[in-house]
Image (cartoon, rainbow, N blue to C red):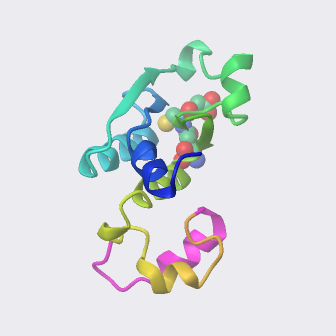
């Protein structure tokens, strides 16, 4: 059994694969945040224009058939807001997810959707 301490270290070194295409603004947000947080990405191009996001293999990862899709150690996530929050949560010290108080205000605080919009609307101007 791996101790929690070691398991934390291990998870930091896991390869994160990002299925994307360079011209996607949704994928670009993810690439920019990963660069900001020094999180290395194994980028795999999947071009929606040529059907690469509609193959059975890709749809098994992302049923929406769109980019970006992130995969880490068998865990798959799609929808760029959810991916951004997943990456931001790796660096709680940066408080990019709204900080503890806002995060506690909703169980979905880091999962996107309506809770995300609620958190955004409560942020003070000028805050990321
Ligand atoms: N809501 C999605 C939108 C993703 C999206 O629309 N991606 C486009 C590329 S920018 C795509 O894959 N389009 C292909 C399609 O809709 O078939 C997100 O934020 O990740």
What residue is shown at x 44% (from left), y 52% (from top)?
8
What residue is shown at x 51% (from left), y 53% (from top)?
3
- Was residue 42 drawn as part of the magenta stretch in this picture? no
The image quadrant where one finds the N terminus is top right
Residue placed furthest toward the top: 50
Q: Nearer the viewer, residue 49 or 37?
A: 37
Q: Quadrant of ligand 1?
A: top right
Judge from the rendering whether residue 100 lies leftward or rightward of residue 53; answer left or right.
left
Residue 30 in which image quadrant = top left
Q: Nearer the viewer, residue 68 or 36?
A: 36
Residue placed furthest toward the front: 1
**What stretch of residues is rendered in magenta?**
111-128
The image quadrant where one finds the C terminus is bottom left
What residue is shown at x 44% (from left), y 49% (from top)?
6
Judge from the rendering whether residue 21 lies leftward or rightward of residue 116; answer left or right.
left
Q: Nearer the viewer, residue 76 or 65?
A: 76
Above/below status of 91 relative to 87: below
Note whether residue 122 is visible: no
What residue is shown at x 56% (from left), y 35% (from top)?
73
Residue 76 in which image quadrant = top right
Report x, y in % for residue 86: 49, 54
Q: Nearer the viewer, residue 44 or 117?
A: 44
């Amino acid at each position: 059994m791996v101790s929690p301490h070691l398991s934390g270290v291990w998870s930091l070194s896991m390869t994160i694969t990002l299925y994307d295409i360079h011209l996607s603004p949704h994928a670009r947000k993810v690439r920019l945040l990963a660069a900001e947080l020094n999180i290395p990405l194994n980028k795999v191009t999947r071009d929606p224009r040529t059907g690469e996001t509609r193959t059975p293999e890709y749809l098994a990862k992302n049923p929406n058939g769109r980019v970006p899709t992130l995969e880490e150690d068998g865990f798959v996530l799609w929808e760029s807001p959810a991916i951004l929050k997943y990456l931001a949560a790796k660096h709680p010290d940066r408080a990019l997810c709204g900080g503890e108080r806002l995060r506690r205000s909703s169980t979905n605080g880091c999962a996107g959707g309506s809770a995300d919009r609620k958190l955004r609307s409560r942020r003070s101007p000028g805050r990321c």
